[in-house]
Amino acid sequence: MPGSRQLVLTVDQSGRGDHRRIQDAIDAAPANGSAGSVVIRIKAGVYREKVVVDKPCITLVGTSASSTVITWNESWVAAESPTVSVLAPDFIAKRLTFQNTFGTSGPAVAMRVAGDRAAFYGCTFLSFQDTLLDDMGRHYYRGCYIQGGTDFVFGNAKALFDKCHLHSTSLGGGAFTAHMRSCESEDTGFCFVGCKLTGLGVGTSILGRPRGPYSRVVFALSYMSSTVRPEGWDDWISDPAKQRTPFYGQYQCYGEGSKTDGRVAWSHDLSQAEAAPFITKVWVGGQDWLR
């Protein structure tokens, strides 16, 4: 916004900044900021705290994703369970790790994104089940690393993952995605463009399964290692009804796990024209709000 002033706050556990805790810095920010109005610079360290971003136009900037870590240890039992929850619009995160160390015994969300127009650059997301709850709104991820065992990118948002690395830690039965979308009129879905999919073993993970009956996921121009099972997709606990309504597509992917001849019959090998709406920032309306 022309004429607006940017507020910069520093978080440093050593006490040499404006705040020692990230949440304290967010709490100190104005309740109704303008675009890009609050930048919170976070010095290197492991911040053991639960963070809620409930104000618009907040930017969190870490020193590096490897050295600036926000971590918590809690299973997903309530809306307040994630390590970090973004509830307000116009959020940006750069060079940060979001982690939930609960382990493999159940869902544990490292990041919940429920605000519109959120962008993540060079960030890392770590947990096992349900790592990244891409819940609602339009979101953009660029150069991020996302790790989990099953359903580790899930929710009902509309998101573009640009040159991201998804790593499965499943030893069998894992799924990279579990998109929701309960009806055809919902304009939501996940698209992965120029991404990399790896894992711990051969044939240990599928690309996705429908958490909602109209689940929509597309992988384009992406590398798929042998971790990806030949069938690619699953109908969620052998529910044939969920074979008719999801939209699962693949376009010009490569690598051992990208072969389409073994894919389930109800997935799509997309043409260039079919893939075109999914593979640019226009997919999330980014031409209007990404900055």
Image: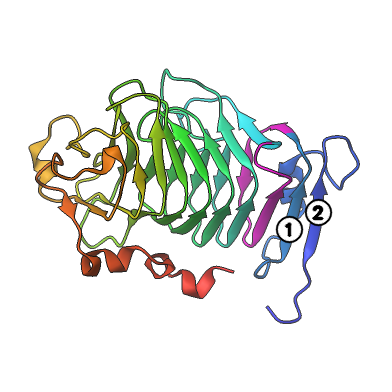
The N terminus - image quarter = bottom right
In the figure, is residue 262 to the left or right of 35? left
Element assignment for label 2: strand
- Up the image or down, 94 lies above or below 66; here it is below
Q: Which residue is mark 2?
A: 9
Real-space Cα distance between discs 1 and 2? 6 Å
Q: Is 140 placed above or below 239 here?
A: below
Q: Nearer the viewer, residue 175 or 24?
A: 175
Q: Quadrant of the C terminus?
A: bottom right
Q: Position of residue 89 (x, y in %)?
A: 55, 61
Give how far across and how far down residue 206 sits, in percent. Answer: 27, 35
The answer to which quarter of the image holds residue 73 is: top right
Q: Earlier in the sequence, mark 1 or mark 2?
A: 2
Q: Is 138 situated above or below 128?
A: below
| Crowd rating for badge 1 (residues with CA inside 10 Å; few <14, some 14–19, many 20+) | many
Which residue of the protein is positioned furthest toward the right in this rendering? 16
Q: Which residue is mark 1?
A: 39
74 drawn magenta: no
Q: Is residue 33 left or right of residue 20?
A: left
Please state which of residues 36 and 29 is positioned toward the viewer in this rendering: 36
User: Percent x, y for residue 128?
Assistant: 45, 27
**What is the basis of the colouring in this image?**
rainbow
- Proximity of marks 1 and 2: CB atoms separated by less than 8 Å: yes
**Residue at 53% across, 38% down:** 125
Identify the residue shown where x is 16% and y is 53%: 268
User: Which of the numbered marks, if any, corresponds to residue 53?
Assistant: none
Closest to the observer, 24 or 173: 173
Circle 1: element type: strand
* Span highlighted in magenta in the image: 46-66
